[in-house]
Image (cartoon, rainbow, N blue to C red):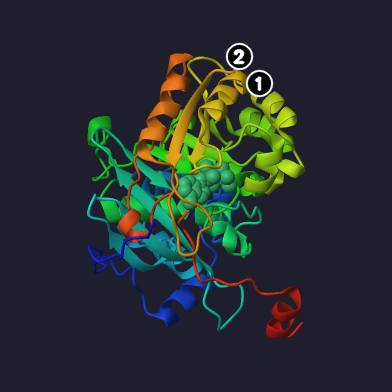
């Protein structure tokens, strides 16, 4: 199958000064960010610029509300604090989001942004990753990245063809959501005195999935910190139940994800036997199916109301036979599960073809008949290469030696 040309793509002009000139960005980046900090860290940042101890807690809450409930983009918009403090904040800190390099709109309403994060090396552009927003009738899903690049090398995944550049920090993970809210006009509290905010039915982003670039469980600490912040009900307020973390099966971290983050879990399964899974999802050689399925059975909080989503990419003639479907049912026995069948999304030179539609439906029927929900994920945003596994950026990894040479170490 050929990837359609992105002819219907519209590059949308940027507002809000988000496309800042490069040197303004660099200056801003010299100042530490307040995004991604927990309340204690935020308090310490305020103490540093002279806020008195007994005022710190109140100021933290004011900032928290401004940053995460109202989405302010400049400290000057924070009218609940004095002009003097606003000035000090502006001089010492930044609340800038990642930079938008391009913004594309698919003919089905899907939006894709190429984002640039902070550069680690002066004079070199920062690493880039993509973020996708998928609107549906009654909800909207934002798909964000946890790493730039990936180490997993899944055979059918485009992101897997690029090396890991680096982990994204908690700031950068939270920053993605803030940027999407900026661009979608999705901040719940528009006015400072608005207590109720946008009703749920008007929210654009109702679900967050860590299904962009990277393996979130290989960046556990930052993902955990970001998720806790994102679910805070005095701020961005996307509860843990609305955040889904997708893993290819980093078994030792799965229990911790359930216990410490408490988000919903998706597992990229794609095969029902080790021989095939070793090939498609090479991390299986390290953590084979038996261990993976046990970790799923043990996932904290697992219940019929909190089922695990198993993702299964449909590859023509590879994993899509009716025997495979029956084996899948066997494998999942006893696990509260939903199976998400993902039609394979092609990318240039990809080694596989998508299964025939009729075959996907037959496959889904077998799983359905066994009592599992098995929605077929409608491909979205294919015309702008925004569908699952199509994300890739040109960012290259910089070797340690090169990094040291550039930094003069
Ligand atoms: N590393 C995590 C997060 C990536 S999520 C994980 O593996 O779960 C991206 C999802 O899209 C995964 O289920 C992945 O296996 C799937 N995917 C990757 N490439 C794809 C492609 N070309 N077509 C359809 N799905 C794909």
Relative to 387, 283 lies left or right: right
- Marks 1 and 2 close (CB-CB < 8 Å): yes
Relative to 384, 274 lies left or right: right
Is any atom of residue 177 visible in this view? yes
- Does dot 1 land on a helix, a strand or a loop? helix
Disc 1 under 8 Å from ligand 1? The reply is no
**x then y, percent, for residue 13:** 24, 69
Indicate the quadrant containing the N terminus: top left, top right, bottom left or bottom right: bottom left
Q: Nearer the viewer, mark 1 or mark 2?
A: 2
- Residue placed at 52% from the left, 22% from the top? 337
- Does dot 2 land on a helix, a strand or a loop? loop
Q: Nearer the viewer, residue 66 or 178?
A: 178
- Residue placed at 64% from the left, 44% from the top? 217
Q: Residue 20: which quarter of the image?
A: bottom left
Is any atom of residue 226 visible in this view? no
Relative to 177, 397 lies left or right: right
Say which label, 1 or 2, has the lower sequence index.
Answer: 1
Q: Which residue is mark 1?
A: 297
Label 2: few (<14), some or many (≥20) within 10 Å?
Answer: few
In this picture, is 55 found above or below 104?
above
- Residue placed at 56% from the left, 26% from the top? 323
Relative to 368, 11 lies left or right: left
**x then y, percent, for residue 142:** 39, 45
Q: Residue 397: which quarter of the image?
A: bottom right
**x then y, percent, for residue 21:** 37, 80
Q: Nearer the viewer, residue 32 or 163?
A: 163
**x then y, percent, for residue 97:** 42, 61
How many numbered callouts? 2
- Residue placed at 61% from the left, 77% from the top? 121
Disc 2 under 8 Å from ligand 1? The reply is no
User: Residue 334's mark?
Assistant: 2
């Amino acid at each position: 199958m050929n990837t359609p040309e992105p002819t219907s793509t519209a590059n949308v002009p940027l507002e809000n000064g988000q496309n800042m000139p490069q040197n303004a960005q660099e200056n801003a980046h010299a100042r530490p960010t307040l995004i991604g900090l927990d309340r204690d860290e935020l308090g310490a940042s305020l103490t540093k610029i002279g806020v008195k101890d007994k005022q710190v807690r109140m100021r933290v809450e004011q900032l928290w509300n401004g940053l995460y409930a109202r989405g302010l983009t400049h400290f000057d918009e924070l009218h609940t604090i004095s002009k003097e403090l606003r000035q000090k904040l502006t001089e010492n800190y930044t609340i800038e989001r990642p930079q938008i390099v391009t913004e594309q709109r698919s003919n089905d309403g899907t939006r894709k942004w190429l984002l640039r994060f902070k550069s680690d090396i002066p004079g070199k552009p920062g690493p880039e990753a993509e973020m996708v927003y998928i609107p549906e009738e009654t909800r909207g899903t934002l798909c964000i990245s946890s790493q730039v690049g990936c180490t997993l090398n899944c055979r059918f995944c485009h992101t897997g063809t690029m090396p890991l550049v680096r982990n994204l920090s908690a700031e950068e993970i939270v920053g993605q959501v803030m940027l999407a809210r900026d661009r979608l006009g999705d901040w719940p509290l528009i006015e400072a005195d608005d207590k109720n905010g946008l009703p749920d039915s008007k929210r654009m982003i109702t679900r967050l999935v860590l299904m962009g670039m990277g393996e979130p469980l290989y960046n556990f600490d930052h993902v955990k910190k970001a998720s806790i912040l994102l679910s805070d009900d005095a701020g961005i307020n996307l509860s843990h139940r609305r955040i889904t973390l997708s893993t290819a099966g980093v078994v030792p971290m799965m229990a911790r994800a359930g216990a410490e983050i408490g988000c919903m879990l998706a597992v990229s399964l794609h095969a029902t036997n080790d021989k095939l899974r070793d090939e498609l999802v090479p991390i299986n050689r390290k953590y084979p199916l038996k261990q993976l399925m046990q970790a799923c059975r043990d996932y904290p909080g697992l219940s019929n109301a909190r089922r695990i989503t198993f993702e299964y990419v449909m590859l023509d003639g590879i994993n899509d036979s009716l025997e495979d479907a029956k084996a899948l049912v066997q494998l999942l026995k006893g696990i509260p599960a939903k199976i998400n069948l993902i039609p394979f999304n092609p990318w240039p030179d990809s080694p596989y073809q998508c299964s025939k539609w009729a075959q996907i439906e037959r496959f889904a029927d077998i799983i359905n008949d066994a009592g599992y929900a098995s929605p077929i994920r409608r491909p979205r945003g294919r015309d702008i290469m925004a569908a699952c596994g199509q994300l890739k950026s040109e960012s290259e990894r910089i070797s340690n030696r090169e990094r040291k040479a550039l930094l003069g170490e």
